[in-house]
Amino acid sequence: MCKQKKALSLITILLLSIGIEAKINIPASAKKQELCQEIYKKITNEHFFNDRDLSFINSEIFDTLLDQLDSQKIYFTKNEITLFKRKFSKFDDPISYQKKYLKSSLCSIDLKSKFSFINLYFNRLIEATNYQLKEVAKKNFDFTKEEVILIDDDQKKWQKSKFELKKVWRKLAKNDVLTSMLADKELDEATETIEKRYENRLRRISQRNEEDVFSISMNNLTSFFDPHSSYLSPKSAEDFEMTMSLKLEGIGALLTTEDDYPTIVSVVPGGPAEKTGKINPDDKIVKILQVEESNSTSTDVVGWRIDEVVQLIRGKAGTKVELEIIPGKTEDFSERKFVTITREEVKLEEQAAKSRIIEIQRNLQIIKVGIIDLPTFYIDFNAWRNRDPNFRSSSKDVETILRKFTAQRVDAVLIDLRGNSGGSLFEANKLTGLFVSSGATLQVKESNGSIRPWGDARAKQIWKKPVAVMVDRYSASASEIFAGAIQDYQRGIIIGQKTFGKGTVQKLDNLSSGQIKITESKFYRVTGAGMQSKGIYPDITLPSTWDIEEIGESSYDTALPWDEIKPVRFKKFSMGPTLISKLNDGHLTRVNQSPNLQYILDMRKRYEIQKNNEVISLNLTNRRVEKEERQSWALDIENKRRASLNLETFSSFKAMKDYNDTEETEYDERDSQIDVDNDYLLNEGMQILSDYAIFNQNIYLSKAA
């Protein structure tokens, strides 16, 4: 019997030694368990929804953690998921919850199980990557075989065994090599690239520490309450402060990791990345090149830790870095764009409102449209606190522009808030006052149920002629407050796409270690309608090239719900009951006649076709045919547009690409300005506003009793 036990122990040791080549086994220390308790107590007491039922919280956050770590169902087996679901649910106790935890400081979060599951995820990722490395090194993939990968996550199922998982891992490795070959690489070069990528992934995983696992665990907890509440580790808090102060020398972009790719979350208005006009949210960074370093070669950063990628991108002001990027909305991961960015410190002046006056010919009339591009709602808080009368702010800068417009006899003003993710709520109030005078701008509801209106009682209306506001899905928070107030007061028209729908306010508090961002209140329109999740619907909807519902507040599973409260008293302006209908009729007529707007609709048709694809081929010939077909389609719709405008058409896709690259370079070298010629939606916004000015040519808006 004793010999049998020794033999079994020896077998166990051997199995462990020949199994996973690296082992992640990070336990939750007593210090982290205490910090978990502190975070749990704080968020349950101070969050806007501080009275929600938490009796099944462990089961619910496990589901979100699973989706976060393995939404594609490629790392865990069905039995493992069942086992961990039971493990997490055992810590839930709906009967004793009310007695034990509701009025207690005890943390009801099973932190040990969370650490255990995240450790398993990292170890499985190591195992999968090692397996893929061996398969890639063989160079034995048959690219003539009719084989596919299922890419529709909703149709994927958990595999029954490790053997079935390995089949998936092999297909994914094959696709990585194939995609690299489609980017004009031979098999040997493609194989070398993917091997380095996998090695980077292994290196990144091996560097994981307790803080990394704890951050994943705690942000999984905070996101259970809503998407904007989060835990910031000491290092993350430091980076957050640098981002908010805008004093960091770099490219001005926020990054995250998505499926091993460093991915652009957002670009800082007025920052180097935004100035290029070529970097967009969801773009994926593949390689980074230090342009001015002698003998410098591109570094493949797929699989890197995000902090390492950030350090590689950051650098001294004036130096240049080149990013090799996969466009965010592409259907072909072999597609690339190369963007060279000059690093610089982001200054307030770079975020300042820009303006331009455009004259539009309408029959025998000339309508002067003043455009104000406002990238963010900014204010120099330090100068304001120091009572500097010359402090910079968005409302002060816009007021200066409006007075210039008045002096130059501008007929109507277009405020462009596309891509404006918000900023100072104080500035949203001040800016609204320039158009509607004194009165409430929004209402704020606190977690204790108290509601108070916000506004500027001393505001003076500076602009009394027609006004329009352009928004899109990336217009959020303060942008929605301003656009919503203009719409509710019937002071102007809203043009574009539905806004983001962020109707919540967060506060940042210090913890014993790190910081926590907690949603503490919601804001509402003066009509009582919430902005949360629904956003602002435009009066006139412009076409888009993609499905805007894929992003925005409503796309988050844990987004707080829309609701409404009582309206406040406010006086509307007189716009006329048929104005919007008339403007929309004119817009639809132009859509049918405009080659540029038809081009956008053609892009949308293509997007709708490709987004419904459920599988991707692993046959090299098929993929090359698909790539050629995409390029042919892109060439055809561009030539269709150019021919309709009597412009010279392109003979090939390469000729079109070379022309566009040259145009972008020449535009980068010009002074920053509002690009009316190439911004088809902005151009249509001006046309709608010029119609508005004609309809109201002799009638200035006035307040109704």
Image (spheres, grey):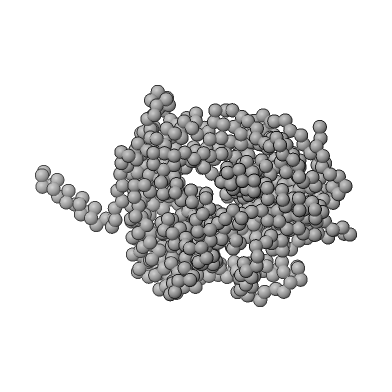
Please tell me which residue is depicted at 53% across the width and 35% down the height of the picture.
520
Residue 270 higher or lower than 6, as above or below = below
- The residue most toward the top is 99
Q: Quadrant of the N terminus?
A: top left
Residue at 81% in and 59% down: 360
Q: Is residue 512 left or right of residue 551?
A: left
Q: Position of residue 415 (x, y in %)?
A: 71, 50
- State the residue lying farthest toward the bottom: 651
Image coordinates of residue 356 in percent, x first then y, are: 73, 58
Is 628 placed above or below 565 here? below
Locate residue 546, reporting x and y percent.
62, 55
Residue closest to the eye, 351 or 695:
351
Residue at left offset 72%, top offset 69%:
642
In the visual, does 261 lie left or right of 213? right
Which is more toward the observer, 630 or 361?
361
Q: Is residue 603 above or below residue 139?
A: above
Q: Is residue 243 left or right of residue 167?
A: right
Q: Nearer the viewer, residue 355 or 218?
A: 355
Q: Position of residue 77 (x, y in %)?
A: 37, 48
> Can the viewer see residue 466?
yes
Task: Pick out the residue farthest to the left.
Answer: 2
Q: Quadrant of the C terminus?
A: top right
Counting the numbered discs, the total is 0
Examine the rendering and report whether any part of residue 586 can be seen.
Answer: no
Q: Residue at x 50, y 49 (%)?
A: 154
Residue 253 vertical position relative to residue 480 in the rendered view, above or below? below
